[in-house]
Amino acid sequence: MGNRLDGKVCIVTGAGSGMGRASAIEMAAQGGRVVVTDVNEAAGRETLSSIEDAKGEGDFFACDLRNPEAIRKLMDFTAQRFGGIDVLHNNAAVHETDLTEHTSIEDLPDEIWDMVYEINLKAIWLATKYAVPFLKQSTRGPAIVNVASTGSFVSFPQAGAYCATKGGVLMLTKATATDLAKYGIRCNCYCPGAVDTPMVQKYIDAAPDKDAIMSVLSGAHLIPRLGRPEEIAKLACFLASDDSSFVTGAAYAIDGGTLAWRGVNA
Ligand SMILES: NC(=O)c1ccc[n+]([C@@H]2O[C@H](COP(=O)([O-])OP(=O)(O)OC[C@H]3O[C@@H](n4cnc5c(N)ncnc54)[C@H](O)[C@@H]3O)[C@@H](O)[C@H]2O)c1
């Protein structure tokens, strides 16, 4: 694969788990200097250890994305530690099934709606806003990579807040690309199908019929299996790197073909 991200300073949110962890490790393997950030300090430090074990370069910064001041400090920390910011990978998100049993539109608690909105959408805007002064100074092809979802386009049961925020991430990506093009800052998102991470495992565990939900999840893929975090990390690196220098405002499906058809594999 080579060192696509040589020297680039990359921030990865939610890098303590799942796809964020895989992307942080892959970015470091491709030569990036990676700030791993997560609200879960132990998990984030584990990711950093994996990077360092592979002789990669990085650091950890604990940040709760519900706290705007902490997001601002994340940017200052990164710039002081590594001399700037070149890549912001807005990966972290939560799903209401992790937070409450009342996940249907008619009984979702107000505070859960607010939490999903703050972490999944508002924090992406704030992180972008606070990173822009540093990204503007980047001489290494500044890029923002957001994580949307197939839920940006189609809904899932018990996921109204999640899907609404992911639809928002799609449009925020386009709006960000539009406003920041004048600075040479690109912004793209990708839209995973069901990927084998703790978030999906919890969604499966919360379902009354686990076999049924499993066949809904991977049965919706033309490639009839869950995605692997390492597969997603390659796309994150492409969008963060100069290999995608003519790509901005785009939404890449990485979903095993889910959005290409309306069938379900038996
Ligand atoms: N797994 C899937 O099938 C799937 C599908 C489509 C999109 N996505 C998206 O991919 C991204 C990664 O998902 P994943 O499955 O790897 O999730 P995950 O639950 O495994 O990891 C999410 C990480 O975000 C962190 N986080 C949660 N709240 C936070 C907060 N307030 N502040 C800081 N960090 C916080 C968690 O501690 C965790 O480490 C998310 O944006 C998710 O919506 C996932």
Image (tube, rainbow, N blue to C red):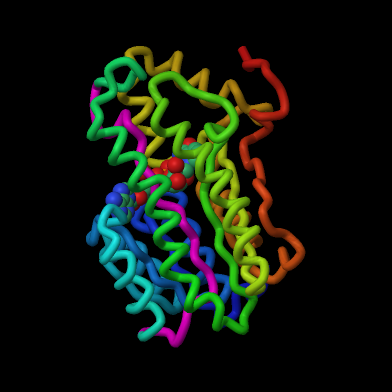
Please, is residue 68 above or below residue 173 in the view? below
Determine if the magenta segment contains residue 159: no
Q: Quadrant of residue 262?
A: top right
In this orientation, does residue 65 appear? Answer: yes
Closest to the observer, 77 or 131 = 131
Count the marks.
Answer: 0
> What residue is drawn where x is 64% and y is 29%?
258
Please, is residue 149 above or below residue 184 in the view? above
Determine if the magenta segment contains residue 86: yes
Looking at the rendered image, the quarter that the C terminus falls into is: top right
Q: In which quarter of the image is residue 181?
A: bottom right
Q: Residue furthest right?
A: 246
Closest to the observer, 252 or 67 = 67
- 245 left or right, relative to 256: right
Closest to the observer, 149 or 185 = 185
Looking at the rendered image, the quarter that the N terminus falls into is: bottom right
> What residue is drawn where x is 36% and y is 35%?
95
Please, is residue 222 above or below residue 58 in the view? above
> What residue is drawn where x is 54% and y is 39%?
149
- What is the span of residues highlighted in magenta in the rendered image? 81-101
- 90 left or right, relative to 67: right
Residue 50 placed where, x, y %?
38, 66
In this orientation, does residue 196 appear? Answer: no
Residue 201 placed where, x, y %?
37, 33
Closest to the observer, 123 or 147 = 123
Residue 56 placed where, x, y %?
46, 76
> What residue is drawn where x is 55% and y is 83%?
137
Please, is residue 239 above or below residue 241 in the view? above
Residue 62 placed where, x, y %?
26, 65
